[in-house]
Amino acid sequence: MTVPASSALNDRSETEPVASPARAETLGEQVFARLLDMILNCEIAPGAVLNEQALATRLNVSRGPVREAVRRLQGIQLVTREAQMRARVISLDAGAIVDLFHMREALEGYACRLAAERITEAELSSIEQQLEATRRASLDPAARPAGTAFDFHTLIVQASGNARIIDALCGDLYLLLKLYRKWSGTVTERKSAAYDEHWQILRAMRARDPDLAESLMRSHVRRAREHIIQTMPTPAPDTPALRPVP
């Protein structure tokens, strides 16, 4: 079933940040957030050409906010500009994935080393609780309250205390990596292995062993890269921009 245009902007993911009451989102920001959500959830397919008029109709807005949103998506490298100024969602590219994950392995490995030295006991306990909640949710989806989200890697990077690494890994690069993870699909075996690897990393951090923590994180990121490359689909050229919403 396709989402009616009149309700499209209101059909936001439960995990999306909600605007602070002190500052309401502008229409342009709402359109950007909605298009970003549509790309990350593959409602707009990888490699799809973005038709601004069709998107404006879909979202029940004028073309101006859509044009502004597309420019912002281009700025964070989720959209490229082609001949005749066509905007296209980035396609799966094994070379780009390898480059991104090499960067991630180096930065996140070092961030994990720093975190092993700097993370507080309260932060460790919080991550442990959230990992356990993730395990319960995998057995029973109702065990995790709606709207909650847990990103193990983001918490580790933030615990490193290195502002430059945090900015690099939690900014635009994070969205690109999230997009590739979405496109690669979910495989139960990898999810289970990743969960076990998270616990190993956390135990090394609790033992205040920076060498082991960095080694385990690097290995974890390499396995993630290999998994994405192995399971990566190849988008067909001129993929329709909008997929039906289940």
Image: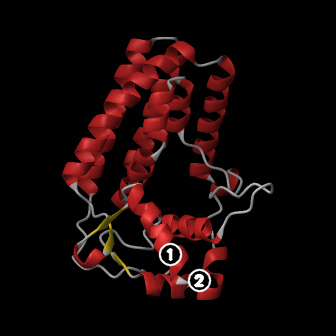
Amino acid at dot 2: Val
Residue depicted at 62% across the width and 24% down the height: 124
For residue 76, which quarter of the picture? bottom left
For the residues labelled 1 and 2, the Cα–Cα distance comes to 8 Å
Q: Bin the neighbour count of mark 2 within 10 Å (Cα to Cα): few under 14, some 14-19, many 20 and up.
A: some
Amino acid at dot 1: Val
Judge left or right: residue 34 versus residue 72.
right
Q: Bin the neighbour count of mark 1 within 10 Å (Cα to Cα): few under 14, some 14-19, many 20 and up.
A: many
* Residue 66 tag number: 1
Q: Are marks 1 and 2 in contact (CB under 8 Å)?
A: yes
- In the rendered image of this protein, does residue 203 appear above or below residue 94? above
Counting residues from the N terminus, which is met first, the one under dot 1 or under dot 2? 2
Residue denoted by label 2 = 61
Q: Position of residue 112 (x, y in %)?
A: 45, 23
Which SS class for mark 2? Answer: loop
Residue depicted at 51% across the width and 20% down the height: 115
Judge left or right: residue 152 versus residue 193.
right
Residue depicted at 32% across the width and 28% down the height: 106
Residue 118 visible here:
yes
- In the rendered image of this protein, does residue 83 appear above or below residue 230? below
Residue 182 visible here:
no
